[in-house]
Amino acid sequence: MVLRNDPVLRLFNGDIGITLPDRAAEGALRVFFPAPHGAWRALAPARLPEHQTAYAMTVHKAQGSEFDHALLLLPDQGGRVLTRELLYTAVTRVRQGLTLCGPAAVLAQAIAQPTWRQSGLQARLLEARIEAGIEAHDKAHNEAHDESAK
């Protein structure tokens, strides 16, 4: 899986190739990437930009990619990370078909569980607002005090 864009090679973050011997190169290993019209283009592994082996990938890693088919393997038990939004992301990565494997109860739990973010952003905004209000109050108080001292 490509991790860094290389426009010259027309490879982009998330592109996936498969490494096989290339008959046209006397059996040398090449990484084959899908090309337009069902063709494949071969590149020597040494030419690839930053990449990593990907036998399988997380839904998070699949964001931004599309696949004709995908397999979504659910855990035996649900959890905080398995949410409606994660399922939506997985389902929308495929063009033709998705195979879903896992307990029906875990799927139902995930569908019923929206993402709950606790970034602390709301608390920080409130804190900044309070601080700004206090500073504005102090400034107005000081200006009023300075005027009365004249």
Image (cartoon, grey):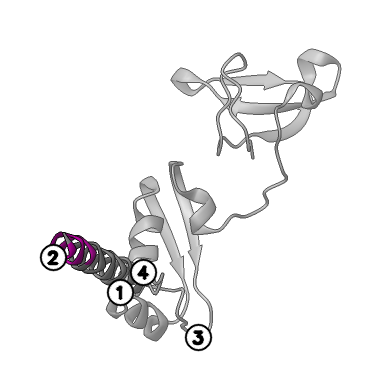
For the record, the magenta segment spans: 142-149
x%, y% of residue 14?
Answer: 55, 39
The CA span between labels 2 and 3 is 69 Å
Residue nearest the observer in this picture, 110 or 149: 149
Q: Secondary structure at mark 2?
A: helix
Is 93 a magenta residue?
no
Quadrant into which the N terminus falls: top right
Residue type at mark 1 is Pro
Q: Check disc 2: other Cα within 10 Å, few if <14, some if 14-19, many if 20+.
A: few
Residue designated by label 4:
124
Q: Check disc 4: other Cα within 10 Å, few if <14, some if 14-19, many if 20+.
A: few
Task: Assess whether mark 4 and mark 2 are in contact (beta carbons under 8 angstroms).
Answer: no
Q: Secondary structure at mark 4?
A: helix
Tell me: residue 76, above or below residue 123: below
Quarter of image, res 46:
top right
Tell me: residue 77, above or below residue 93: below
Horizontal relation, residue 98 to residue 42: left or right: left
Q: Residue furthest front?
A: 150
Residue designated by label 2:
148
User: Principal SS element in the magenta part?
Assistant: helix
Residue designated by label 1:
114
Horizontal relation, residue 39 to residue 138: left or right: right
